[in-house]
Amino acid sequence: MTDDRLCSRAREAVTETGRNGLPGDLRRHMESCDACRKYAWSVEALRDSRPEEPLYTPALRVRALNGLPPVSTCRNFPWWILPAGLALQIGISVVVPGVVLVRTLGLIVHDSRTLTALTITGLIGLGGLTALAGVVPVGLKLLKEKNHA
Ligand SMILES: [Zn+2]
């Protein structure tokens, strides 16, 4: 067996089992080969420097869990938050623009059916513009990232 092949076999065995588990031919090689002996020392030094205790101890677990906010506060919000938020959302996105449209268009159009149709059309248009304002920048950013990748 050539020295190179013996060296690679010896280093592989040292990495897996350590020097004590080597078969006779590899142990003899270790005694005669400086490079493999230095390799074995470095592997043993790495093994010795590794901490034996687990990094995640029960005490650390307790401290980490105590640092988290209690789960119950997330579920204890008042019942009226959801309907109030929904009402506020509808008010901001539908009622306020609707009133503004009716007042503005009411200066020009005096027929109530036409005014209602124009207001509804205006609200739909506003919704579309709002969606575009949200979607277009994101789409442009994604296209830019795709071109850079
Ligand atoms: Zn060797």
Image (cartoon, rainbow, N blue to C red):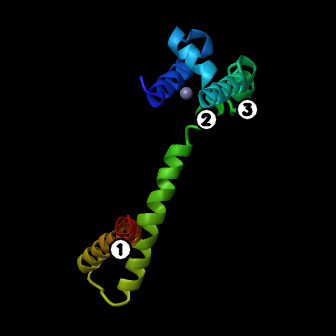
The CA distance from mark 1 to mark 2 is: 35 Å
Q: Earlier in the sequence, mark 2 or mark 3?
A: 3
Is 129 in front, or is 95? 129
What residue sits 56% from the left and 44% below the top?
81
Residue 16 to residue 91: above or below:
above
Instruction: Using the rendered image of the protein, determine whether residue 53 is visible from the camera's viewpoint.
Output: yes
The CA distance from mark 2 to mark 3 is: 15 Å
Is 34 in front, or is 16? 34
* CB-based contact (under 8 Å), mark 2 and mark 3: no
Q: Which mark is residue 74?
A: 2
| Local SS, label 3 | helix
> Quadrant location of the C terminus?
bottom left
The residue at which mark 3 appears reads as 67
Tell me residue 88's x, y (percent): 51, 57
Tell me residue 87's x, y (percent): 48, 54
| Local SS, label 1 | helix
Is 58 in front, or is 37? 37
Q: Earlier in the sequence, mark 1 or mark 3?
A: 3
Q: Is residue 67 left or right of residue 13?
A: right
What amino acid type is highlighted by mark number 1? Leu
The residue at which mark 1 appears reads as 129
